[in-house]
Image (tube, helix red, strand yellow):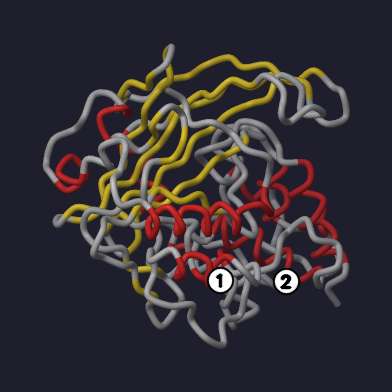
Amino acid sequence: MRPLRTPPVRRLAASVLAAAALLLASAAPPAPGVDDALIAGDTLPQRLSEFRFFIDGRPNRRVVRYQLNTPLFSDYADKDRFIYVPAGSRARYGADGAIDFPVGSALIKSFSYPADARQPDGPRRTVETRVLLRRASGWVALPYLWSGDDAVLRRGGARLEIGWTDKAGRARTVSYGVPNANQCKECHQSAGALVPIGPKARNLDDGHQLGALAAAGLVDRAPPGLAAMPRADDPAAPLAARARAYLDINCAHCHSRAGMASNSGLYLGFDEPDPVARGRLKRPVAAGRGSAGLAFDIQPGAPDQSILLHRMASTEPGIAMPELGRTLTHDEGVALIRAYIAQMK
């Protein structure tokens, strides 16, 4: 059965605390827990239900919902994210805020579209659920496509036509792509290994969530002195920080020194200290079609003369960035980066 959706974001701490209470209070679990052997084993389960991440649409024990301050844009799909860490284990934070999950952990993410985004709790279509399984050999990424009351493994990917009404009341359509196994690797690969993209301490730190995850026994502690990434859509946060948070989650998994685009010299991580590496007055390493004849990745004060914005605004294959995971322009993201470049001196 599809994971049930609950009202959006800031109820997360309550969700985590409820899971913690369940862990402490339940002496006789009414249902079997998550299938740990299936996560850590070497098989590829054909149906999502085999893992038992959800029972009657609700998260099983130690399956805890989480939110990101700034999420990756995926053609306006809504996402429901969950962490699972097996009993007796805890994830640990590294010095850079990355989270080291123990073998047997899983990250579960479901993608859905509401029929009408003005009614987020109304009818919606859940399209796929992607799982990252932490095995002894490393992370394994598997996409499951929903059909009826279960989702079926689709390693070859798929493309689906989806329609919805957006928050402005406009009818929208998208040719939605379920990634194949190789495409999963392209986005999740760092230094030759598959890694999670979103759940880093700086992108989980909303003032409550890290402590709640620690209280639920899923992580060892909330790291002290962390520089949290702001929400990209928070107008109260500094513009530059919001823009760099957006570029980090949407681009830095490739545009980093360990990512697939390391040879570009364009590094868009939130903590990147070198302004030239972040694109400022940086010439592209190749003057192909994607550069549109422009000189710099970022031309301060001139968004329309900046390759970065040109590629973000495009939907044309070979020009559009990111290359995977979107076929639509993220209007709000383009507006944010446009404002960020325009205010540069």
> Mark 1: few, some, or many residues within 10 Å (few <14, many ≥20)?
many
The mark found on residue 202 in the picture is: 1
The mark found on residue 215 in the picture is: none
Find residue 301 and report its horizontal and vertical position in percent.
Answer: 86, 67
Q: Earlier in the sequence, mark 1 or mark 2?
A: 1
State yes or no: discs 1 and 2 in contact (Cβ < 8 Å): no
Find residue 8 and report its horizontal and vertical position in percent.
Answer: 68, 44
**Which residue appears at 26% of the width and 65% of the height?**
89
- Residue 273 appears in which quarter of the rendering? bottom right
Q: Amino acid at mark 2?
A: Ala
Q: Which residue position is annotated with label 2? A: 241
**Which residue appears at 76% of the width and 22% of the height?**
116
> Mark 2: few, some, or many residues within 10 Å (few <14, many ≥20)?
some
In what element is the residue under mark 1?
A: helix
Q: Residue furthest bottom?
A: 225
Q: Real-space Cα distance between discs 1 and 2?
A: 12 Å
| Camera-side residue of 174 and 122 | 122
**Which residue appears at 27% of the width and 59% of the height?**
192
Q: Quadrant of the N terminus?
A: top left
| Camera-side residue of 236 and 188 | 236
> Which numbered mark, 1 or 2, is in the foreground of this view?
1
**Which residue appears at 67% of the width and 32% of the height?**
328
| Camera-side residue of 219 and 234 | 219
- Residue 129 appears in which quarter of the rendering? top left
